[in-house]
Image (cartoon, rainbow, N blue to C red):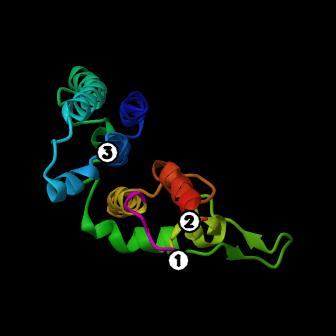
Amino acid sequence: MALCVGMSAVSRQLTIFYFLPLAYFLLEKHGVHRLSAWRLEQGNPPNLKPLFKDLLLAGSITLGFISCLLVSNYLKYGDPFESGLNLMYPRPQFSLDYLLKNVRHYFIKPPSLSSDFPSLVYNLRGDSLLFTSPFYFFAIPIRKPATAIVYCLGLTLVIIFGFLLVYASPGGNQFGSRYIIDVLPLIFLLLVFRF
């Protein structure tokens, strides 16, 4: 799984935050929730070496891919944190100035109405998720008590979406919102845990 997180972070940098659910799954796999029970019982402490070994391995694999990306950027552009966007668009890539525009784009912007057939005309620059992909909103947990994994997935989704809301562009020519692909796996997992 760390291999997938590392490889995806090379092409979609915000997916580096997928390491949070990966770490949670490793904690669950090794039964870290038993630590509180151990403190109550004061029995033999659980063996945490396999957990630390797995976390170190997963972190090393992910950091290896990120290091390759940083070296590649340095060799191409002379700066490890430059991805080439600043050369094409000389403006800040992340700014709070983009927040209202992106909130409108991701959540409010409807398709245009036309008197010609078809009556709805979708904007090539993208339309709101509410109109193009309303099923995403089913991922919001309602009525069912949220578990720790739902909180972890939700936190990761909020972090990534927070970055998307202050990013310079919502995705260029597209149907819907192209950059939503960064959070699609999280949305699908939240949908699984919701039902």
Which secondary structure lies at badge 2?
helix
Amino acid type of the residue tagged 1 in the rendering: Ile
| Camera sees residue 88 | no
Q: Nearer the viewer, residue 7 or 84?
A: 7
| Rendered location of residue 94, percent (x, y) | 27, 56
Seen at 45% across and 58% down, the residue is 170
Amino acid type of the residue tagged 3 in the rendering: Gly
Residue lying at the far right of the rendered structure: 117
Amino acid type of the residue tagged 2 in the rendering: Arg
| Closer to the eye: label 3 or 1 | 3
Picture quadrant where residue 177 is located: bottom right
Magenta segment boundaries in residue numbering:
142-149
The numbered disc on residue 50 is none
Q: Residues within 10 Å of mark 1 (few under 14, many from 20)?
A: few
Disc 2 vs disc 1: Cβ atoms closer than 8 Å?
yes
Which secondary structure lies at badge 1?
loop
Q: What residue does disc 2 label? A: 194
Q: What residue does disc 1 label? A: 142
Note whether 70 is above or below 192 in the view shown.
Answer: above
Q: CA distance from mark 3 to mark 1?
A: 28 Å
